[in-house]
Image: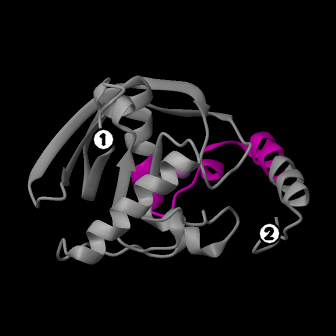
Amino acid sequence: MAVLDIVTFPDPRLRQPTITVQEIDEGIRALVRDLTDTMYAHDGAGIAAIQVGRPERIFLVDGRVATGDPKADPVVFINPEIVETGGGVVGDDEGCLSFPGVFVEVRRPRRAKVRATDLDGRTFEIEGEGLLGRALQHEFDHLEGRLLIDMVGFVKKEMIRRRLKRWYAEQGRAPAAAL
Ligand code: NI
């Protein structure tokens, strides 16, 4: 178990192609444990493997967000697919562990249904709206290399860059690429 470093925008690793998980072995189970620790340590509602620099098509959604039960374990999505979206398009504030300190309104379909494989190799589906619908789409986007900043217009893109520049300065770190 370990809390891993989060890859933050504009690190090009967030855009790297992802790979389908062929076998759920001990390496994948260890990765999921580390993702769980990392998501909780950073107080995230979800996390994708690519956010810790791993290319496997895996994401987690916080158990409370996914099931409504505050004691529930995170739900693990392996090789997920979006089955459908609907319910009209709604805007709401969204954050991302790879965009520290950024909350920005993103417009998305209200509802999403995702099919995935769980850690036991079984196929399952989850459908949600509101925060869950949004989390499912946001985390799936990570596996396609699609990020928060791609979902907003020019003015918000500039605001995101300004906030991240400030965050990197506060951390005494340089971004991995020009912001
Ligand atoms: Ni994110």
* Residue under label 1: 73
Q: Position of residue 27 (x, y in %)?
A: 29, 77
In the image, 155 versus 9, the foreground residue is 9
Could one spot residue 141 in this view of the protein?
no
Q: How many marks?
A: 2
Could one spot residue 59 in this view of the protein?
yes
Residue farthest along the front direction in this orientation: 1
Q: Quadrant of residue 46?
A: top left
Front of the two marks 1 and 2: 1
Q: Secondary structure at mark 2?
A: loop
Q: CA distance from mark 1 to mark 2?
A: 33 Å
In the image, 55 versus 109, the foreground residue is 55
Q: Is residue 83 magenta?
A: no
Label 2 Cα crowd, 10 Å radius (few <14 / some 14-19 / many 20+): some
Dot 1 amino acid type: Asp
Q: Residue at x 91, y 59 (%)?
A: 169
Q: How is the image coloured?
A: one colour
Q: Which residues are magenta?
A: 139-161
Asked whether mark 2 lies closer than 8 Å to ligand 1, one says: no
Query: What kind of secondary structure does the magenta stretch mostly adopt?
Result: helix
Please give the label number shown on residue 175.
2
Dot 2 amino acid type: Pro
In the image, 144 versus 68, the foreground residue is 68
